[in-house]
Image (spheres, rainbow, N blue to C red):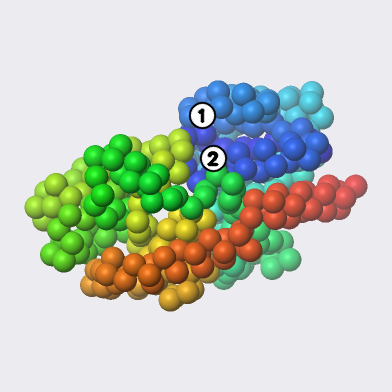
Amino acid sequence: MKILYLSNHLNIGGITSYLLTLARGLKSRGHEVYIASSSQGLTAGYSKEGFTFFPIPIRTKKDLSPKIIFSRIKLSGLIREYNIGLVHSNTRTTQILGCLLSKSTGCVHITTCHGYFKRRLLRRIFPCWGDKIIAVSEQVKEHLLDDFKVEADKVKVIHNGIDLEKFKITDQKSKSEAKRVLGFEDSPVLGIIARLSDVKGHTYLIRAFPEVLDSFPEAKLLLVGRGKMQAELLKLVKGLNIQNSVFFMPEVCDTMEMLAAMDIFVMPSLKEGLGLALMEAMASAIPVIGSNIGGIKSLIKDGTTGLLVEPSDIKGLTVAMLDLLENKDKAAALGKNARKFIRENFSQELMVEQTEALYLECLKNRG
């Protein structure tokens, strides 16, 4: 197969990680992989991996942007030149682009829904779902069926896959070294890796932290990521007078560098399709706390693979964090169970196999 992946950018984040995992896996199975995106992000890394990269002016969130038309004109010719049979989109604007490319070239169009969409008029007029839709969790599939009335047989749930060779259990010596590099010495470290957006729930985590400090004054809270909420969150930290205990770090290429320093991972999201960073933490055997919503509740089995709290429940977050800090044996058991759960249900090999099978099915149906 010749496969073209579409993305608005290749910045550090869940979609970029998803694309790289799929691209590597399918290339290792003998398929030719092409990637079209704006020139922003990790484009050099993709080229080094042996993937053909097509720069396109798709850095937009507008459904009716002329950038989509310019990208279609460029890619239509390249699809014909390279005889590409399938395009795979990953965002709303690239879904529109993929739909246009499918109509103009006859290629199969697959789209992955990584989360939840707002029910806007243009989405109803121009759904642009493609031949098949990959939903990253059962909850995202339910969202598509309930909110957009997508036909059930058009949606296939394929979970994100994790590289267990990369995300390994960090021994105590390595964890101490990772903390030392960050200036935390041997303090207990709680953290989250996520863009600084209101939907990720950082506000509730920060508000829950002062009571944790009452019992564990040496504890640190590590917030890894960038986003529009940063100034507001910094102001909140200062207002609570906990600026000596809360640390902001920019996004990192290798999340394992940050996970290695964490004793507890917290994801207090208000909405979450699945939660790739949460899965990486679980694969690393780090005890996790998450909101009882969306894809998170399909990962965390309360009391078995982690702890669940209700969304925006500040007191619940405090109680959960203190529980794991006070009960190290319980925390270790949850981390061990979490890694086992990821290994058995969310391997990258399974993700690649299921995606490849879906591609082949769609190509066969197209004749």
Q: Is residue 293 above or below residue 166?
A: below
Q: Which residue is mark 2?
A: 16
> Does residue 84 appear in the picture of this structure?
yes
- Closer to the chain start, of discs 2 and 1, is 2
As helix, strand or loop, the secondary structure at mark 1 comes to loop
Farthest right residue in view: 367
Q: Position of residue 256 (x, y in %)?
A: 45, 44
| Residue appearing at x 29%, y 53% in the figure | 189
| Residue appearing at x 80%, y 36% in the figure | 30
Res 29 quadrant in image: top right
Res 96 quadrant in image: top right
Q: Nearer the viewer, residue 199 or 336?
A: 336
- Inspect the image, locate mark 2, and give the three-letter code of the amino acid beneath it: Thr
Label 1 packing within 10 angstroms: few (<14), some (14-19), many (20+)? some
| Residue appearing at x 38%, y 72% in the figure | 330
The quarter in which the N terminus is drawn is top right
Q: How many discs mark residues in the rendered view?
A: 2
Q: Position of residue 36 (x, y in %)?
A: 62, 31
- Inspect the image, locate mark 1, and give the three-letter code of the amino acid beneath it: Leu
Task: Judge left or right: residue 112 versus residue 203.
Answer: right
Res 251 quadrant in image: top left
Label 2 to label 1, Cα distance in Å?
A: 9 Å
Q: Which residue is mark 1?
A: 42
> Does residue 294 appear in the picture of this structure?
no
